[in-house]
Image (tube, helix red, strand yellow):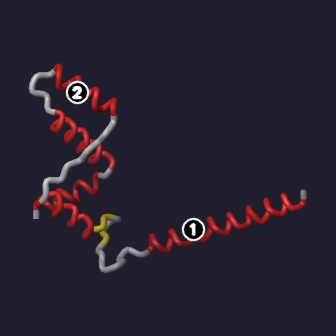
Amino acid sequence: MTGDLMDKVFGDIKSKKRVQGDEERAESLRSERLMNETLILNDINLKVLRDAIEAATTKRQMIGVWDPEIAAAMQYLKSTIPRYSISKCAAKWIMEGLEREYPQLIDKIRSEMKE
């Protein structure tokens, strides 16, 4: 019985130390904004962003989503609405979601693509 109690006590101590160490590592990572010669502006990694824009504009980049409910709804709409475009509709909905969830990223992409 005492062995179980000791395991519990020391296990709690070990987990607290592990959490504290994780918090310290996370804080040190947060405080470093320039790493590996990569410019980070407002938490947007500009090198990665420019690489993504380059890939998106020079290669035909496609996005695939597999979800039976979405597929069924889109197929239904395509079958019942003349000239309905699954791609245009999906692009519109994805863009609305990105603008809502990541407005700074979308603004930065738009400004970078204008340059």
Left or right of 27, for residue 42: left
Left or right of 61, for residue 3: right
> For mark 1, does the 10 Å Cα neighbourhood hold few (<14), some (14 to 19), or many (20 or more) residues?
few
Q: Earlier in the sequence, mark 1 or mark 2?
A: 1
Viewer-closest of 46 and 51: 51
Residue 105 image position (x, y, % from top left): 27, 57
Q: Which label sits on residue 2?
A: none
| Amino acid bearing label 1 | Asp
> For mark 2, does the 10 Å Cα neighbourhood hold few (<14), some (14 to 19), or many (20 or more) residues?
some
Residue occupied by mark 1:
22
Q: Quadrant of the C terminus?
A: bottom left
Q: Determine whether the residue tagged by mark 1 lies in a helix, strand or loop.
A: helix
| Amino acid bearing label 2 | Gln
Residue 12 found in image quarter: bottom right
What residue appears at the point 16 percent right and 60 percent down from the top-left corner?
A: 111
Residue 112 image position (x, y, % from top left): 16, 63
Residue occupied by mark 2:
75
